[in-house]
Image (cartoon, grey):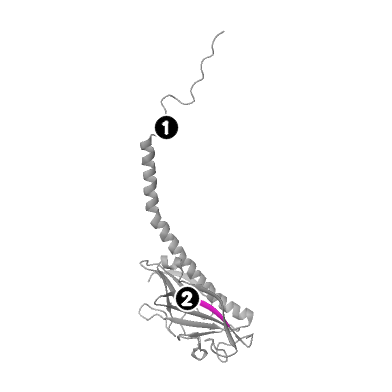
Amino acid sequence: MALRPASPRAHPSGTRGFSLIELMVVVVIVSILTILAVPSLSAARMDQTAYGDAGAIMQLFRSARTRAIGWGAAMLVSATASGSDRGTFTLYQNAIGGVPSTTCGPPTDWSGAAAGQVVTAVDGVNLNGNAEADASLQATIWWTAGAAPSAGQNSLPSLFVCFTPLGRSYVSTGAIRTPTMFSPATLSYSPIEIDLQRTGVSTVRAVLVPQTGMARLFSKLP
């Protein structure tokens, strides 16, 4: 009986696997590429933080006007940004004797000091979190009656915008939420602009708030 020839080997005799040195070279190359990619990924994450916060501020102003009309109650947006405050934006509602206030001015007292009145925070955006600190993010508030924001004017440490159930807006630049400081926003006043910028980064994420309260988001260079 004739013997069957042995089966051929699965791999040609000339092939072999990677050597240890070759594997180490691949690992080193992958490590270098990873290190080079980390700064780009970090910058993208920080920029996304700035863009997301700007979008949240935009929605806060839009929500203020929508709630005022839908709820039949005056709504106040408080915006502060100066010094150690990277930016704090809060939406308030006032109730007098348990009934939501419908006016931005007297008898409504947004300072919370008047007897029988309760000022409640409904929503807000706070830029003083860890993500904003890591991104070195800072908000700047601009507004001047009858003039567009410009690089030469001073920024505001605080600004308050109140919306009535009729959709009218009132603006105050005082340090406290006092009703006597509010004045009607006419067609001649400039839109409010809130800039969010990271230290050392030229791109600014800006929120533009017109008289109607229908804020919009855009990007610009300083």
Query: Quadrant location of the C terminus?
Result: bottom left
Asked if 196 appears above or below 113 in the picture, the reply is above
Say which quarter of the image contains residue 39. bottom left
Percent across and percent down for residue 120 are 57, 80
Disc 2 is placed on an element classified as strand
What residue is pinned by disc 1? 17
Asked if 182 appears above or below 124 in the picture, the reply is below
Check if mark 2's residue and mark 1's residue have beta carbons within 8 Å.
no
Q: Is residue 92 magenta?
A: yes
Percent across and percent down for residue 158 are 45, 81
* Alpha carbon distance from label 2 to label 1: 60 Å
Q: Three-letter amino acid code at disc 2?
A: Thr
**Residue placed farthest to the top in the image?**
1
Total numbered badges shown on the rendered structure: 2
Q: Residues within 10 Å of mark 2 (few under 14, many from 20)?
A: some
Q: Is residue 165 left or right of residue 29?
A: right
Along the line of sight, the residue nearer the viewer: 50 or 123 = 123
Percent across and percent down for residue 44 are 43, 60
> Please, what is the dominant secondary structure of the magenta stretch?
strand
Q: Residues within 10 Å of mark 1 (few under 14, many from 20)?
A: few
What residue is pinned by disc 2? 88
Q: Which mark is residue 9?
A: none
Along the line of sight, the residue nearer the viewer: 66 or 37 = 37
Query: Quadrant location of the N terminus?
Result: top right
The residue positioned 63% from the left and 79% from the top of the image is 70
Residue range (magenta): 88-93
Percent across and percent down for residue 122 are 57, 77
Disc 1 is placed on an element classified as loop
